[in-house]
Amino acid sequence: MTPKIKSIEITEVANLDPAAYQPGDPEDFSCTFGLTIGPADSDGGEQFYISVCSPKWLQRACADRGFIWGRNHLVVPSYDLAMIRNVIGKFVQNCSGASWNEVASKLSRIAAWEFDDYQA
């Protein structure tokens, strides 16, 4: 089974297209990408969330808070949407598997899956 990104949004503002997002300082930013990812051969998908930030933001946030948790983060030098989409897209393409659960488990290594802690 091959996964496909069906949609991407910035979660801080409802229905914000990442192309419309412009941080005040592209080298000092943090935002959360909401990714809808599902099987390439079917409609729909499930939600995955990844925080995308810059090293300057990490440094400032660490100075302010004293720490930053690192899970589900992508650190990039600056806000470059094409590059961010490319990095995430390549990872998603490499997460094929025998079942959707296998694929989603692989995807959840870098992004919080809406069903991460779900138990039937």
Image (cartoon, rainbow, N blue to C red):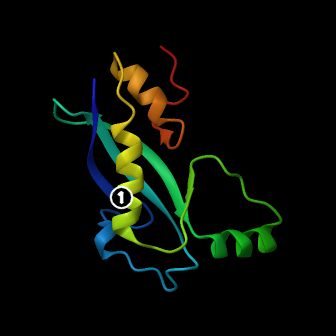
Q: Measured along the vertical axis of the image, is residue 89 above or below residue 106?
A: below
**Image quadrant assignment for residue 99:** top left
- In the rendered structure, the answer to whether residue 92 lies left or right of residue 7 reads right
Question: 18 left or right of 77?
Answer: left
Residue kind at label 1, given as amino acid type: Arg
Left or right: where does residue 42 sit relative to residue 100? left
Vertical placement of 1 versus 71: above or below? Answer: above
Is residue 15 visible from the viewing direction of this image? yes
Secondary structure of residue under mark 1: helix
- Judge by depth and name the residue closer to the eye, 45 or 56: 56
Q: Is residue 11 left or right of residue 16?
A: right
Q: Position of residue 12 (x, y in %)?
A: 45, 65
Snapshot quadrant of residue 85:
bottom left
- Give the image location of residue 19, x and y in percent: 29, 71
Q: Residues within 10 Å of mark 1 (few under 14, many from 20)?
A: some
Q: Which residue is identified by label 1?
A: 85
Q: Position of residue 106 (x, y in %)?
A: 47, 30
The residue depicted at 73 percent of the width and 58 percent of the height is: 68
The residue under the point 53% across, 57% down is 51
Question: Splitting the image into 4 quarters, where does residue 21 fall?
Answer: bottom left
User: What is the quadrant of the N terminus in the image?
Assistant: top left
Q: Could one spot residue 47 in this view of the protein?
A: no
Q: Residue furthest bottom?
A: 24
Name the residue located 32 percent from the left edge and 44 percent from the top edge: 36
**Figure disc tally:** 1
What x and y, as percent, mark residue 26?
49, 80
